[in-house]
Image (cartoon, rainbow, N blue to C red):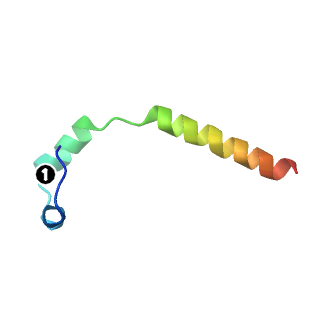
């Protein structure tokens, strides 16, 4: 998918566009794991004190 302008952003989205998003979506697993580890480390640092 290519970037959309502000006007295009306000246009209706088609069922084909929704289907394309669902078919091409890839879960950002590495990002989620990194953020989880960071959050756990921060919480541990806060509550250990």
Q: What residue is pinned by disc 1?
A: 15
Residue 8 at x, y percent in the picture: 13, 62
Which one is nearer the viewer's eye here, 45 or 36? 45
6 up-or-down from 48: above or below: below
16 up-or-down from 26: above or below: below
Residue 20, located in which quarter of the rendered image? top left
Which quarter of the image is occupied by the N terminus?
Answer: top left
Q: Is residue 30 left or right of residue 20?
A: right
- Can you name the residue that lies furthest to the right here? 49
45 up-or-down from 7: above or below: above
Task: Report the number of numbered marks.
Answer: 1
Residue 16 at x, y percent in the picture: 11, 47
Residue 49 at x, y percent in the picture: 88, 51
* Secondary element at tag 1: helix
Residue 9, located in which quarter of the rendered image? bottom left
Name the residue rendered at 60%, 41% in the picture: 36
Residue 28 at x, y percent in the picture: 42, 36
């Amino acid at each position: 998918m290519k970037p959309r302008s502000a006007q295009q952003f306000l246009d209706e989205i088609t069922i084909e566009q929704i289907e394309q998003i669902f078919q091409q979506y890839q879960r950002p697993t590495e990002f989620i794991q990194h953020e989880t580890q960071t959050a756990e480390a921060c919480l541990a640092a806060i509550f250990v004190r």
